[in-house]
Image: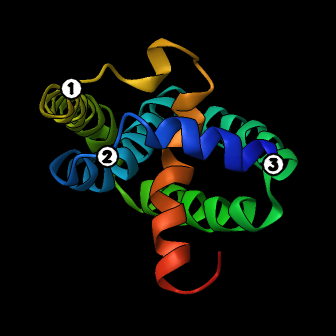
Amino acid sequence: MREIDTLLAKYGESHLNPTNEVIHFICVPVIVFTLLGLLWAMHWSVAVAVTIAAMVYYVKLSKPFAVGMALMAGAMLLLLAALPDQVILPLSIAIFVLAWVGQFIGHQIEGKKPSFLEDVRFLLIGPLFVLSFLYRRLSLA
């Protein structure tokens, strides 16, 4: 079994409740966006550098997933570039906190702890988990 399949299966073990899945489908992309926003607030180059580093990891796991993540991250970076600088940090902080509260509510409903508490790599696998549902819907995976 490919490493990406193993990681997605392991991540999926703590994301079986339909309510938790819906919460993740909403909150995970929001967390990615707001994390990029927090990095952007430091300097746009920090957000771009972290995105590139994540893409290197994603390419090693799966080229098709890396393409999807690159498109998503690229769109998020473009949106951040269009926002007024003074809005990015407070907006990112507020929404980041709310999205994580949502995540923990989802895991409370699920009755299982978040995967990243076992393995920090799952912070990068969460977005792929969400993307995998889109890929299956579009018959891409």
Q: Earlier in the sequence, mark 1 or mark 3?
A: 3
- Residue 42 in the image: state x and y as whole percent: 51, 26
Figure check: 55 above or below 124? below
- Looking at the image, is mark 2 or mark 1 nearer the viewer? 2
User: In the rendered view, does 98 fall on the left or right side of 137?
Assistant: left
Residue on which the image places disc 2: 16
Residue on which the image places disc 3: 1
Cα distance between the residues tagged 2 and 1: 14 Å
- For disc 1, the neighbor class at 10 Å (few under 14, some 14 to 19, many from 20) is some
Decide if residue 43 is in sight here: no
User: In the rendered view, does 94 fall on the left or right side of 121?
Assistant: left
- Residue 82 in the image: state x and y as whole percent: 42, 62
Give me the disc on residue 32.
none
**Contact check, label 1 and label 3, Cβ < 8 Å:** no
Picture residue at 43% right of the left edge, 62% below the top: 79
Give me the disc on residue 104.
1
- Residue 112 in the image: state x and y as whole percent: 28, 23
